Image (cartoon, helix red, strand yellow):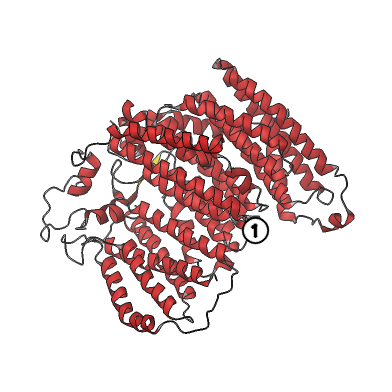
Amino acid sequence: MRRFLSALIVLGLIMFFISTLPLIPEFGKASLSKVSRAFIDKDVNGNGGNIQYGVSKDLENGAANVVTSIVVDYRSFDTLGEVTVLFTSALGVGIILSGYKRKKFGREPNFILRVSVGILLPLILLFGAYVFIHGHLTPGGGFPGGTIIAAGILLLYLSNEEFDLSKTVKFVEGISGSLYVIVGLLGLAVSGVFLINFLPTGVVGNLFSSGIVPIIYILIGFKVGAELSGIVAELHREG
Amino acid sequence: MSALLIAVPLLIAFLFVPLKNKIKYILPFVALFSLILILKLPIEQVNFLGGWKAPFGITLVLDNSSYYSLIVVNIIFFLLSLIPQIIEKDLSLIFLILMASINGLILTGDLFNSFVFLEITSVAAYILSSSKRNYYGAFKYLILGSIAGAFYLLGTLYSYIGTGSLNLADISKNINSEFLAVVPILIFIGLAVETKIFPLAGWVPDVYASGSALTPAILATGVTFSMMYLFGRIFITVFHGEFLNVVYIFGLITVVVAELSALKQDNLLRALSFSSIAQAGLFLSVISMNSYESLTAGYFHLLNDITAKFVLFIIAASIGKSFIKNKTTGIAFSIASFSLIGFPLFAGFRSKLLILKTAFLNQNYILPIILLFATIIEIAYVLRWNIKLWYPDNILPQEKEKTQKLSWNVNLILLIVALVIIVIGFYPDIYLKIAQNIASGLTNYRAYVTNVLGGM
């Protein structure tokens, strides 16, 4: 009976979703709405228009990567929320797994692992830092960059049994998170609007451009890296 | 300025990650700060975050309804922060995050932003519900809540396809009938888990009855209230009452099923959780009549319900098998439970009467029948639990020794809240004013749209 009922519900949902398919525009034929159009043209305040890479100056938003311009500038508040979701989840992993003793295997990890971590780790950290520092220019940003750094930290945990970073991680996490909010509050103090981009936006495509966007992405990179490393540390501790 | 309500608790939560143990002493100050800040804020204020104007950026809308909802929620948080005994050590941070996210959920004027805050709220709620090693209930809640979140996101996606905007006021203005047939279904499934509609409310008893006092005391009061506010905001302001007929039927089914299950329970916390589901169903079916009067009655009843549940859940979770050693606590419990069943002279009576009156004015006779039926069942189990706790039979002397006396601050706060219930029973004007303001803010969608998008 129960199985039959669940099959019926799933069937109903599938029928429902099939019936909604005609609402979705065909591939490649979607007409951009006024909001999407304004985000792409950097035209929210009505002074955008023709943008040239490396030439256009002092636009309302200076990020060359359109995704970054939406994620960290137009809808930065959502990103603050998403960072908080990750923060809360990492906290939850810590709370649920607290009280477990760390299990020790009592033998040295594989030679190949130890040596190759030494070679790979600087490259991984460099790549992660590159991804989040250049988030406003190239695909990438704080979330992927932080994840890459956390992958490097995971290698450290695997190759060295005595390695423990959980205290440092907490500090980095707390400080970068509060700096994000403080940058927002600075906007509130400077121009009366929370999370406003109060620095000059510069030339599109330069490394030092688009105001607070790269600063926030670097903070997000540190925060995401620290949070994911914290999760790795907690899960590693659980025997 | 209203962004401070979200930014300050978040900032303090981030700052105090390395100093988890000290955070307990700061909670009352943060809660008091946001309460004072709300009272200082001017109503009818729209805050454009990042400086991007209405349909493009994210807006925080402070109108009549969100203002009074914020006051209610923050008073609950303030009262809870004064009872540090029930907040376990690690959960203080979660408490702060929950405070920020619920303030955001109420303030936001953006559909995707509300999804983000819904996510934060539910993640915090999963963690709260896993306290006292209640992993089974938390897992059930996690699975249901995540799937519902996916549906909410899909609804957001479809409304973006349909209107090209995520701003609630813009969606309300531009959505066409083709999309009105799809989006409300998805959003309804997305909110059904948090608003406790019958087929998706299976997690409630497992989570609320974990034995922790904080979990039900937050989830059944503050979180429920903000979810109900969001429900009203989306279905009444944005969709203009579309799809509410279905909500009405689901609400009535929820009332009947939940009350019948509550009668069968032999655990007080589980019985109260089912009663909580039933009241949520009742509230939803009342606001489904979609008029100013019905919304007033609905939110008035919701306010009475959360006031009573605040007292009932804390007492039920922290007291043993009887009131022998805690007579004052017992009095607060009895007052709250009488208000729950709508005994004359208590607050619940006023709101149930108002619901009956509105239903008869709308020539709706099914709702009153169900309400009276539910009330009879409620009387049965509430009286049974009162008798059981006041005159416990076969209680062993060792158990009597073990029951601890509740400390004075818990008793004081519970008594104050119980006193509020009695005062509301005689002078319902305070709660009625809050309910009327919320109702007028939600029903007057033209004012909302012009308020956010500017005069046009």
Q: Left or right? Give the position of B179 relative to B201.
A: left
Asked which quadrant contains residue B170, the reply is top left
Farthest residue to the top: give it: B363
Q: Nearer the viewer, residue B198 or B388?
A: B198
Residue at image location 39% in from the left, 75% down from the top: A155
Q: Which residue appears at 52% of the width and 42% of the height?
A: B194
Element under disc 1 = helix
Q: Residue at x 20, y 67 (%)?
A: A207
Q: Quadrant of residue B385?
A: top right
In this view, the residue in front, A27 or B437, is A27
Foreground of the two, B14 or B50? B14
Residue B455 appears in the rendering: yes
Residue B362 x, y percent position in the rendering: 54, 17
Q: Position of residue A106 (x, y in %)?
A: 53, 83
Q: Whole-percent x and y of residue B109?
A: 39, 41
In this orientation, does residue B12 appear?
A: no
Q: Is residue B149 left or right of residue B372?
A: left
Image position of A160 with respect to B37: above or below: below
Which chain is mark 1 on? B
Q: Quadrant of the C terminus of chain B?
A: top left
Q: Position of residue B181 (x, y in %)?
A: 37, 28
Q: Which residue corresponds to mark 1?
A: B84
The kind of residue on which mark 1 rests is Pro
For image coordinates 51% across by 35% down, the residue present is A4
